[in-house]
Amino acid sequence: MTSESRRDEIGERVVRAKSKLEWDTPMYQLAVSQLDQTAEIMNLDANIWERLRTPQRAHVVSFPFRRDDYDTVETVFGYRVQHLLTMGPTKGGIRYDEDVNLGEVTALAMWMSWKCAIMGLPFGGAKGGVRIDPNSLSLTELQRITRRFTSEIIEVIGPDRDIPAPDLGTDGQVMSWIMDTYSQQKGYAVPGVVTGKPIEIGGSEGRLEATGRGAIACAVEAGRRLGLSLGESAVVVQGYGEVGGTVARLARALGAKVVGISDVKGGLYNASGLNLAGVDAWLRENRFLSGFPDGDGVTNSELLELPCDILIPAAIQNQITKRNASALQCHLLVEAANGPTDLDADAILDSRGITVVPDILANAGGVTVSYFEWVQGLQQFFWTEKEVNDRLIELIQRAYHEVESIADRRGVSLRTAALIRGIERIADAKRRRGLFP
Ligand code: GLU
C-alpha cells in the first residue's frame, strides 16, 4: 500500500468515526463553526484545530429522583463536559433547564475554554446541566436533586480538577449544597470545589454582580470606540435575572436610560426610561414584570427590535437569528448571555455595521471573579469588594483592548478577534506541553 492510499484510508476511517457525534446539535454546530472559521483565518495547526473541535471528557449520568410526595420516582439526566484539560482545572457553570442536552453543554464548555483563555485565567472550559425545570421543584426537591447529581459526578469534580459555578436555573444556594455534599464525602470542608458560593461559606465579594459588571465595562469601552457614551445612551436589556438585573442597574447608575427590560414572560418599554427602583419594588410583590404600570408591555421578540443605542441580551441562547437580525435597531450589541446570536445573524449584523461585543468577552466577568473566589479560598485570604471590582475592571479592560487591537490589525469582527485571542493562547500551551506518549 502506498503511503498516499494509506493516508486516504485513515482519512476515511476518521470521517466515518466522526459522522455521528453524540453531542452534534445546532448549538454545538454553532460553536464548532465559530472555531472552524477562526482557525482558517489564523492558519491554525491542523492537529490542534482538530483536538479543539471535540470535548476531552463528556460525562452523562442518569439517576432516580423522588418527588416530595414519596410516590413518584423519575429518571433524570445530567451532564458534565470538560472541553479542555491543557490549561489547568476545568471551569464552568451548571444549568438546570428542561431542554438542556449534551450538545448544548458541550458548546457552552467550548465557549468557557475561549473565555478563560481570553481573560488569561488558568482554566480550561467545562459546563454541566441537569435536564429538569427548576421552577417545577420545591426547595427540598431542588436540594435532593442537587445532592444526588453532585454525588453522581463527584469523581470528576474537585478544586484541582473541575470547579462548577452557577448558570441558568442555579444559584449560590445550589452551590452551597454541592459544596456540602462534596465536603461530606471528603470528611472536611472543601470550599474550592465550587464558586459563586454565598459569602458565609467562602464566596467572594462582588461575584453576584460580576457578569453584569464586566458586560457594562465592555459596553463602555466599545461605546468609546463608536463615539457612544453609555451615560447618554438608550439601553435595552433582555432578561432581568442576576445578570440582566445588574446590567440594567449599573447602566442606569452610569446615567443611561434603560428603555426596555424583560423576563421569561415578556418585557416592558418606556421611551423616557424605566424607573428601575419602581420595577424592583413591583417584583417584590409580583413574580413577573407583566402588569407594571409605568411601561408598555412588549413580547420578548418585540423587545429585541426596539429602537435603542445599546442592546444587551442577558437571558438565553439563540435569540438573534436571520429572522430578526435585519430588524434590530441598536448600534451596539453586548452579549451578556451565552450564545445569543447565531452565525447567520452575525453576518447580517456585520454587514449592517452593528458592533457586537461577543459573549466570550462580554460575559467573562463572571468566571473572572470565580477565579478570584477560587484563589481567595485556596489562600484563605479574602479581598474587599473594592479590590475585587477594581481587579475585575482591570482584567476585562485589558482583555477588551487586546481583542480590539487584533480586530483592527486583522480587519475582523470583535467576535473573530476574541476567538483568535483565546485559541492562540490555548494553541501555544498545547505546543509547549507536547503530545503523550
Ligand atoms: N456560568 C458562568 C459563565 O457562563 C460562570 C462560570 C464560572 O464562573 O465558572 O461564564
Image: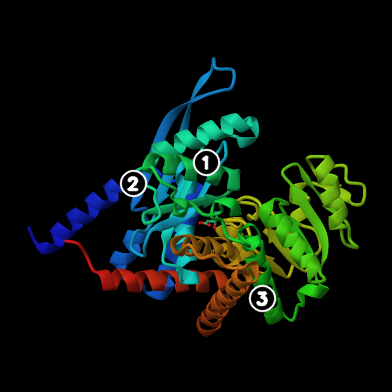
Callout 1: few (<14), some (14-19), or many (20+) C-alpha neighbours within 10 Å?
some
- Label 3 sits on residue: 222
Specify the label residue 211 is tagged with: none
The colouring scheme, among rainbow, by chain, secondary structure or one colour, is: rainbow
Front in this rendered view, residue 371 or 98: 371
CB atoms of marks 3 and 2 within 8 Å: no
Q: CA distance from mark 2 to mark 1?
A: 39 Å
Of marks 1 and 3, which one's residue comes earlier in the chain? 1
The part of the image, by quadrant, that contains residue 228 is bottom right
- Label 2 sits on residue: 19
User: Residue 132, percent across and down?
Assistant: 55, 34
Vertical arrangement, residue 219 with respect to residue 243, above or below: below
- Please tell me which residue is depicted at 85% across the width and 46% down the height of the picture: 282
In which quadrant is the C terminus drawn? Answer: bottom left
Q: Residue furthest left?
A: 1
Of marks 3 and 2, which one's residue comes earlier in the chain? 2
Callout 3: few (<14), some (14-19), or many (20+) C-alpha neighbours within 10 Å?
many
Vertical arrangement, residue 194 with respect to residue 364, above or below: above
User: Residue 142, percent across and down?
Assistant: 57, 34
Q: CA distance from mark 1 to mark 3?
A: 39 Å
Specify the label residue 177 is tagged with: 1
Amino acid under disc 3: Ala
Of marks 2 and 1, which one's residue comes earlier in the chain? 2
Left or right: 285 with respect to 118? right
- Please tell me which residue is depicted at 22% across the width and 65% down the height of the picture: 435
Question: Quick one: SS at disc 1?
Answer: helix
Amino acid under disc 2: Ser
User: Residue 133, percent across and down?
Assistant: 60, 34
